[in-house]
Image (cartoon, rainbow, N blue to C red):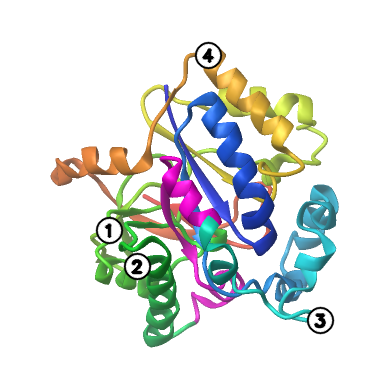
Amino acid sequence: MKLALKIDIDTERGTRIGVPALITLLREFDVPACFLFSLGPDNTGKAIRRVFRPGFFRKVSRTSVVSMYGVRTLLNGTLLPAPRIGRKHADIMRAVRDAGFETGIHCNDHFRWQDYVRTMPLEKVRAEFSAALAEYERIFGTRALTAGAPGWQTCANARQVYDEANLLYSSDARGRAPFFPRIDGRVFSTLEIPGTLPTFDELLGRPEYPDGKIVAHCLSLLRADALNVFTLHAEIEGMMKMPLFRALLEACRAAGVEFVRLDDCARGLLQNRDAIPVRDIVMAAIDGRSGLVATEGA
C-alpha cells in the first residue's frame, strides 16, 4: 500500500512550533511529506464568523480548539495584529526544503480563501493566489509547483488561476483517486490528487473514535489499489497530537506501508495523461467537518 502525507500549515504558531517538530519526527522515520504553507497574514481570529455554520459548535467542543491553536492565535487579525507568516518564518520554511521535503502553497490568507474564494470574482482570486506565488518565490527562489486549498474550498475561478500558474498538481478536494477536475462543465488542466483519508480533527473527540482506536481506523481505510493521501495539520499532529501521529507512523511501518512523494506520483501519472479520468468537483458535506467541502463527483 502506498501512502502520501500532505501537511497543511494554517497559522503562525503552527509554522513556528509544529513545522520544526514534524521535520524532526518525519526524518526519524525517514518518511517524505509535502508541506503546504500559509504565506501571508494570519487572520485566524476572524474565523469566529464561522459560528453560524452547521456543525461548527460541535467540532469546536470536541477538538479543544483553544488548546490546539492557543489564545494568541485565536485573536490574530481581530484584537491582535495579523502576523505575516512568510516574513517572520522564511527560515523555517527553507529548513523544510533543505531537509529534503516537498513544499508548496496552502494560501496567502487562510481565512480569506477558506471563507470567500467561492464568492470572489476572478480578479480577486487571481490577486490572492498571485500574492502567495510571489511570496513563495521570494522565500524559496523558485516557483511553486503545487497548492492545496484551505478547508478544501475551491471553485472554477480558483482552478483557472491554478492552470495559469502551470502547477504540476493540486490537492484541493476529497476523493478516491487522482483526476482532472470539471466544474460547471469546464475541464481544467491541473491534475488533482485528492485527500482520501479522514483527518484527525474529523475523528477526535467522537465517542466512536477514542484516541486508542483512531490509528487502527485509519489503517483499515488504506487501499492497495489506489494512492492513499493523508492530510495532517502542523497545529494538530505537529503539536498536542504528535504522539498519536507517531503511533500512526509506527503502525504504517509495521504494516509495510510504502510512503511516497506527491510530486513523484504526479509526474508518474502525467506521463500518461490520457489514462487520467475527468471528474466533477462537487461541494458536499463530509462526516466530521462543518460546512461543505470540495469532493470528487461522478
**Residue 114 appears left or right of 260:** right
Residue 101: give x, y in percent of width and height. Answer: 43, 42
Q: Amino acid at mark 2?
A: Arg
Is the residue 172 above or below the residue 184 in the image? above
- List the residue tagged with mark 4: 255
Q: Secondary structure at mark 3?
A: loop
* Circle 2 Cα neighbour tier, 10 Å, few/some/many (<14 / 14–19 / ≥20): many
- List the residue tagged with mark 1: 190
Q: Are marks 2 and 4 in contact (CB under 8 Å)?
A: no
For the residues marked 2 and 4, what is the alpha-carbon distance in whole angstroms? 37 Å
For the residues marked 3 and 1, what is the alpha-carbon distance in whole angstroms? 39 Å
For the residues marked 3 and 4, what is the alpha-carbon distance in whole angstroms? 47 Å
Q: Amino acid at mark 1?
A: Thr
- List the residue tagged with mark 3: 79
- Residue located at (83% from left, 35% from top): 207
Pick the front one: 146 or 201: 146
Residue numbers of the magenta segment = 92-119
Residue 252 location, quadrant: top right
Residue 200 location, quadrant: top right
Q: Are marks 2 and 1 in contact (CB under 8 Å)?
A: yes
Q: Is residue 98 magenta?
A: yes
Q: Amino acid at mark 4?
A: Ala
Q: Which mark is residue 159?
A: 2
